[in-house]
Image: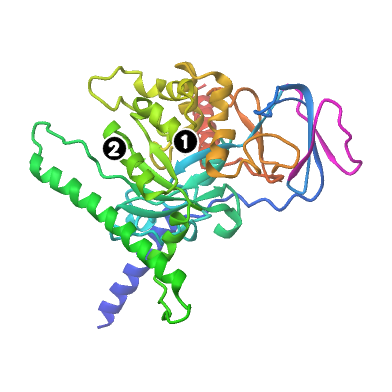
Amino acid sequence: MIIKKIYKLGFLIAFCAFWSMIIKASDQIPAPPQKYPIALIGGTIHPVNSPVIEKGMILFDKGKITDIGLNIRIPSDAVKIDITGKHVYPGLIEAKSQLGLTEINSVSATRDFAETGNVNPNVRVEVAINPESERFPVTRANGIALVVSLPSGGLISGKAALLMLDGWTWEDMIMKAPVGMVLNWPRMRIRTPFGLTQRIEEQRKQIKEQLDELSNVFREARAYKAAREASGKKGVPFHKIDVRWEAMLPVLRGELPLWVNANSLLEIKSAVEWADREQVKMVLMGGADAYRAADLLKRKNIPVIVTPILRLPYRRDADYDEPFKLPARLYEAGVKFCIAGGSGSGNERNLPYHVAMASAYGLPKDEALKAVTLYAAEILGVDDQVGSLEVGKDATLIVTTGDPLEIITQVEKLYIKGRNIDLNNKHKTLYLKYQEKYQQIGEREE
């Protein structure tokens, strides 16, 4: 009996030690609220929605931009920071990620982005966010100030949230929640490659079942909406609250858009037709074939979150540069869009390079920058707060050594609502550590 207890105790200690090694809180301390005015002087300011200001000044106080221009009045109590030779841009926005919901992909206990079941409109990702994630510091060190974290899995995954990449708790980090309800449109392409385990008839049956389920979900949600609205009226009994259908009410009222994951032309057309019939707002995510449906998307005023850019072509017979040209094609067609990395958890820091590739393949440079700042903010419904540098907007901005879309550029400062964010992270710590290691090895060899 004693040996058994010792064995259990030893196992418990080993288990705790293991998790303490792999699930470690980030070392960075969240920044306090801005306490005094800050003036950045002498840098090149890129407001995004207006001309560039050479050797300009930008002043912000209490988290808001209070003045911007060439010669502005700076309060006597302001902290003046000389940024001559540097550049100021709005903080970048990643519109599709699972930051804060997953830490180590191979460890299931650190993955909290999907629930069981096929229909989960009541899921709110913000309550599952881990503010201690090591991935937050790594991401913001490359100029990304805001991210959308969204659920996945099933037919209706739940509601996405827009996060600021700094804060003690998930409540501190929320900028807007929810920003959209995630719907994974059924894959409608019949696959016939060698070795396919499902026959064509089975695939068609599965597609029909998923579409029927989606129709039933909205039919039940609308019935619930009607019952809730009538509840309490004369002669109508009280209707019990159902958290799943209650979560659908903002979608049915047109207050919350559906973020529809769809890529092929058939899926996009089917989703747009369905959204039109159901009279719900739609945002297209992914959209590999979006340029093929550009006229339809423009006519229906459906924005596209293009993600990712750095990928293989969607079709086997497509040109190698098809994904790189997609944003330029949407821009030329007049379709509203933004660009997201969305290429896998842990790679959110690479967002600027997705945009850079789109710029290299036809998207005008100014439009490329807007695709991860102003346009993203417009699609998310927060362009009155972020996305450009204007008086009255949040002081969420970065100071860089050059164009943030270029790999050689370094982000030297990040402010989120005027708070000076610590840009150190695990990657930088390891870089300095092993730089010292090889310097010591070199000295010994000498």
- Residue 94: % across, % down: 51, 39
Q: Quadrant of residue 421?
A: top right
User: Distance of mark 2 from mark 1, alpha carbons?
Assistant: 17 Å
Q: Nearer the viewer, residue 1 or 127?
A: 127
Q: Nearer the viewer, residue 68 or 227?
A: 227
Mark 1: amino acid: Asn
| Residue depicted at x 79% and y 51% | 35
Secondary structure, mark 1, is loop
Q: Is residue 164 left or right of residue 160?
A: right
Task: Tell me, yes or no, whether the highlighted magenta stretch contains residue 67.
Answer: yes
Residue that label 1 marks: 301
Q: Nearer the viewer, mark 2 or mark 1?
A: 1
Mark 2: amino acid: Glu
Q: Which mark is residue 267?
A: 2
Bounds of the magenta segment: 64-85
Q: Quadrant of residue 377?
A: top right
Task: Tell me, yes or no, whether the highlighted magenta stretch contains residue 207.
Answer: no
Residue 373 visible somewhere in the drawing: no
Q: Nearer the viewer, residue 123 or 109?
A: 123
